[in-house]
Image (tube, rainbow, N blue to C red):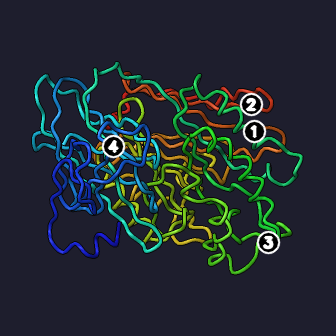
């Protein structure tokens, strides 16, 4: 839509029923659009009007009215450009919520805000995170707005944290990585699994044929096929620090940040719900969002021993999402004795720096997950705003099985249960099970 943007020098208002670039009126659109257009529908299922309202800049918005009571539902598709579009919905001039539009083909049904009382409601929808790079263009296309009877909220769900898998990609015959992922997909309904993340050291070392990245990518493919969003933190073994012989190379600092091969095999598009990145085209520092249990979640992956500029970017992301419960994933944070790490390794800043300048400063940071050292540990800290922060280490470096940390959240009970299970050997690790109540989730 950038050609259109380039030639529009004034605010353009397109009234319902008029297609941009067409002299013929189409079936009546439910929207009036400012700094946008009414276009032929391209998503499914096709709306009754045969059109959708396209918003292409942060000053674009659409107006419509709905009649009735219940939860407000928006049907929309989006154009992905280093993240999916976010829309802000207002009713009667009051913002009621934001939602990420995460499909380019299915208009879906995005629920926004608290249930509305009976009556007629004026709804405004704004695009709030426009992006254009020359290679891609982030837009949103609105098919309908309606109210639906409010179903009871499913308040219990889970997410999974995969620990260091570097021992599982060395041999083509080793199926532990793929078997773990297959098990998670098979248990998706039983666990109500909404998200999977990885705390780093996805591979062990690079080789000329990059086969370890290939094996890891193949192992993760079932998540993509099942539509389960995921993210990967980058560990010290995921870049170019370790050579084809498995031995560390020098200078380690610059090689730690050489993640070009990793980013060739693992992209934001593969992950499925990434909304933003510190550096274009790199997943070293990225965040993804989703909604589960009736609350919003933000999963933030931060590079190992991060540069201060990356921490500043993370601060901005967390501050811009005050109604999201933040899950931070970084490769090194806790030590095996559950203390916060003090060493910056061959990076730029220590885990203690991350705690002091990011984790403890924001009231919506809830969880931190890490790997790198030890086996498993946990701790609870209190942030400067009085919020409790729950941190978990899972590493294992197993040569015989494939542990995964499962985290079950009950938003009604404001509680957490986490346990570690290895599907390859059907093995439990009861010493590492934890239960917490009074999480203080942001709602």
Task: Look at mark 1 in the image and give the residue it sits on.
Answer: 402
Numbered disc in front, either 4 or 1: 4
Could one spot residue 276 in this view of the protein? yes
Is the Cβ of the residue at disc 1 closer than 8 Å to that at disc 3?
Answer: no
Task: Look at mark 4 in the image and give the residue it sits on.
Answer: 50
- Vertical placement of residue 350 versus 299, above or below: below
Residue at 21 percent of width and 41 percent of height: 30
Q: Nearer the viewer, residue 332 or 322?
A: 322
Identify the mark nearer the N-term, 4 or 3. Answer: 4
Q: Position of residue 57 (x, y in %)?
A: 27, 63
Identify the mark nearer the N-term, 4 or 1. Answer: 4
Identify the mark nearer the N-term, 1 or 2. Answer: 1
Residue at 69 percent of width and 54 percent of height: 202
Q: Is residue 420 left or right of residue 363?
A: right
Callout 3: SS: loop
- Vertical placement of residue 426 versus 57, above or below: above
Q: Dot 3 surroundings within 10 Å: few (below 14), some, or many (20 or more)?
A: some
Is the Cβ of the residue at disc 4 closer than 8 Å to that at disc 3?
Answer: no
Task: Look at mark 2 in the image and give the residue it sits on.
Answer: 423
Q: How many angstroms separate mark 1 from mark 2 (CA)?
A: 7 Å
Callout 2: SS: loop
Could one spot residue 384 in this view of the protein? no
- Vertical placement of residue 99 versus 115, above or below: below
Residue at 51 percent of width and 66 percent of height: 306
Q: Which mark is residue 243?
A: 3
């Amino acid at each position: 839509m950038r050609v259109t943007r380039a030639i529009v020098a004034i605010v353009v208002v397109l009234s319902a029923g008029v297609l941009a670039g067409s002299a013929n009126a189409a079936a009546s659109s439910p929207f009036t659009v400012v700094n946008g257009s009414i276009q032929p529908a391209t998503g499914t299922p096709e709306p009754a009007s045969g059109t959708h309202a396209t918003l292409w800049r942060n000053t674009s918005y659409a107006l419509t009215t709905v009649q009735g009571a219940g939860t407000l539902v928006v049907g929309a598709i989006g154009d992905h450009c280093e993240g999916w579009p976010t829309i802000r919905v207002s009713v009667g001039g009051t913002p009621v919520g934001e939602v990420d539009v995460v499909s380019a083909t299915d208009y879906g049904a995005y629920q926004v805000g608290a249930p509305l009382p009976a009556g007629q409601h004026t709804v405004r929808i704004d695009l709030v995170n426009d992006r254009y790079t020359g290679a891609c263009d982030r837009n949103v296309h609105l098919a309908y707005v309606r109210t639906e009877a409010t179903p009871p909220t499913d308040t219990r769900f889970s997410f999974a944290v995969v620990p260091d898998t570097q021992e599982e990609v060395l041999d083509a015959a080793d199926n532990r990585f793929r078997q773990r992922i297959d098990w998670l997909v098979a248990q998706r309904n039983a666990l109500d699994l909404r998200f999977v993340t990885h705390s780093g050291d996805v591979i062990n070392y690079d080789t000329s044929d990059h086969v370890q990245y290939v094996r890891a990518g193949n192992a993760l493919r079932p998540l993509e096929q099942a539509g389960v969003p995921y993210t990967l933190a980058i560990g010290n073994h995921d870049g170019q620090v370790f050579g084809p012989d498995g031995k560390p190379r020098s200078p380690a600092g610059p090689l730690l940040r050489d993640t070009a091969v990793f980013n060739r095999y693992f992209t934001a598009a593969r992950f499925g719900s990434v909304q933003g990145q510190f550096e274009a085209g790199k997943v070293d520092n990225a965040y993804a969002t989703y909604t589960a249990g009736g609350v919003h979640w933000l999963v933030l992956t931060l590079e190992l021993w991060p540069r201060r500029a990356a921490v500043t970017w993370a601060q901005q992301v967390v501050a811009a999402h005050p109604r999201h419960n933040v899950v931070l994933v970084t490769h090194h944070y806790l030590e095996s004795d559950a203390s916060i790490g003090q060493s910056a390794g061959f990076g730029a800043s220590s885990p203690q720096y991350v705690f002091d300048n990011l984790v403890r400063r924001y009231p919506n940071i809830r969880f931190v997950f890490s790997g790198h050292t030890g086996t498993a540990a946990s701790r609870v800290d209190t942030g400067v705003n009085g919020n409790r922060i729950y941190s978990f280490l899972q590493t294992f470096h197993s040569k015989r099985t494939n542990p995964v940390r499962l985290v079950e959240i009950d938003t009604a009970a404001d509680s957490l249960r986490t346990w570690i299970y290895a599907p390859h050997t059907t093995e439990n690790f009861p010493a590492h099970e934890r239960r917490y109540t009074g999480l203080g989730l942001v709602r």
